[in-house]
Amino acid sequence: MTYNVTLIPGDGIGPEVTEAARRVLEAAGVRFHWDIVMAGSSAMEKFGTPLPDSVLDSIRKNKVALKGPVTTPVGSGFRSVNVALRKELELYTCLRPCKTYPGVPSRYMNIDIVIVRENIEDLYSGIEFEKGTPEAAGLIDFILKTKGDTIRQDSGISIKTISDMRSRRIVKFAFDYARKYNRRKVTAVHKANIMKFSDGLFLTVAREVAKTYPDIEFEDRIVDNMSMQLVQKPNQFDVVVAPNLYGDILSDLCAGLIGGLGLAPGANLSDTIAVFEATHGSAPKYTGMNKVNPLAMMLSGVMMLRHLGETENADRLEKAISEVIAEGKYVTYDLKPEAPDSAVGTSQVADAIIDKLTRR
Ligand code: NAD
């Protein structure tokens, strides 16, 4: 069988890591027809938009995509392609497993945490009011009249929205995931003590959903405490479900626990579409240097194989990756903090994994 998959090389280090991932996925014995489309800065230069319709059309048609990171200009310029993709395709779940592989230099052992992040709403709703605009002034006036609260006129405003439906949907996803993969506990993360109507709603809904899964333990943590506990005693956590912003931050934190962003894979999921991508961004300073770690992208590819039902080939590829990490010879600089000069480049990591796969 040949799978039709949309391939988005992305910006910065994206083309290098997606190419490395493509090579190992094919070496794992799975046949693909790659529909290669451009998004991000490269698409902006060529088509005048960072997210051409052709990208959305291709993903809608193929239902599965492997995506490299894309650059989002900070403060000005075009809005995030990632946020737009997630909204357009209703990719409401961001699934980020964080697992330690033997041989990775890290302060922690045996971490196996899955972050389930709500992917569409919260402070990522994209509803913002720029300082000094009539819209911002109107909103400030409305809040003064309705709530009696004063907001400074020189404020920029970003709106945080948390809905019952989307909270319920993501928490249910976390519990279904826990059940499917024999996980014992779900932890909901929030700041409901301060944001009573947004995070408070998320927590209320999470508690309601938890009652319908009596076979799985449930607990909740305030996000600041959660951050401390993740660093101090990470092994107590299993599946973690969070609104968008906390999920984003905590998944980078968890990537740090397992050896860094070079090892943290991810998937953005709707009920029918799956876009697989690493947690890391486009790391522009390393563009074209054949330097960065392709394993996060490859492990996202392993998740894609599982999604496609290619379980055996996924296991084979993950085993080959795990062996290369454990041997510690053909790994990139981030996995060799003590001897960075002996690190290899992005494509040599792919060569080593392909060598393992083809020798078996
Ligand atoms: P980043 O993840 O690109 O890089 C931060 C640092 O992490 C890098 O400097 C590097 O030291 C390390 N790193 C990242 N990936 C690595 C890899 N594969 N191997 C080894 N080390 C790695 O984060 P940033 O610098 O904050 O963001 C750069 C750009 O990426 C921004 O425009 C941002 O908006 C974008 N971004 C995109 C996505 C996405 O497309 N999904 C996600 C996050 C950030």
Image (cartoon, rainbow, N blue to C red):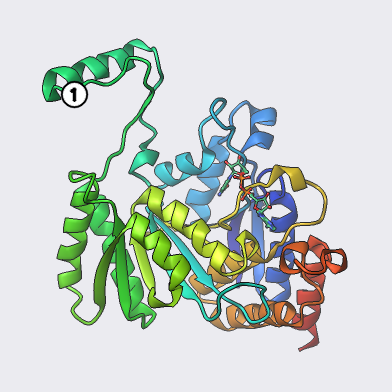
- Image quadrant containing the N terminus: bottom right
Residue 92 in percent (x, y) is at 37, 53
Residue 309 in percent (x, y) is at 50, 76
Residue 64 in the figure: left or right of residue 134: right
Label 1 beta carbon less than 8 Å to ligand 1 = no
- From what the image shows, is residue 243 above or below residue 51? below
Residue 290 in percent (x, y) is at 82, 55
Which secondary structure lies at badge 1? Answer: loop
| Residue pictured at 63% horizontal, 63% vertical | 296
- From what the image shows, is residue 125 above or below residue 296? above
Residue 35 seen in render: yes
Q: Nearer the viewer, residue 307 or 194?
A: 194
Q: Which of 201 and 194 is in front in this view?
A: 194
Res 132 quadrant in image? top left
Q: Count neighbours of disc 1 (C-alpha within 10 A) and say few if under 14, some if 14 to 19, many if 20 or more.
A: few
Residue picked out by circle 1 = 149
Residue 244 in percent (x, y) is at 38, 50
Residue 110 in the figure: left or right of residue 34: left
Residue 210 in the figure: left or right of residue 68: left
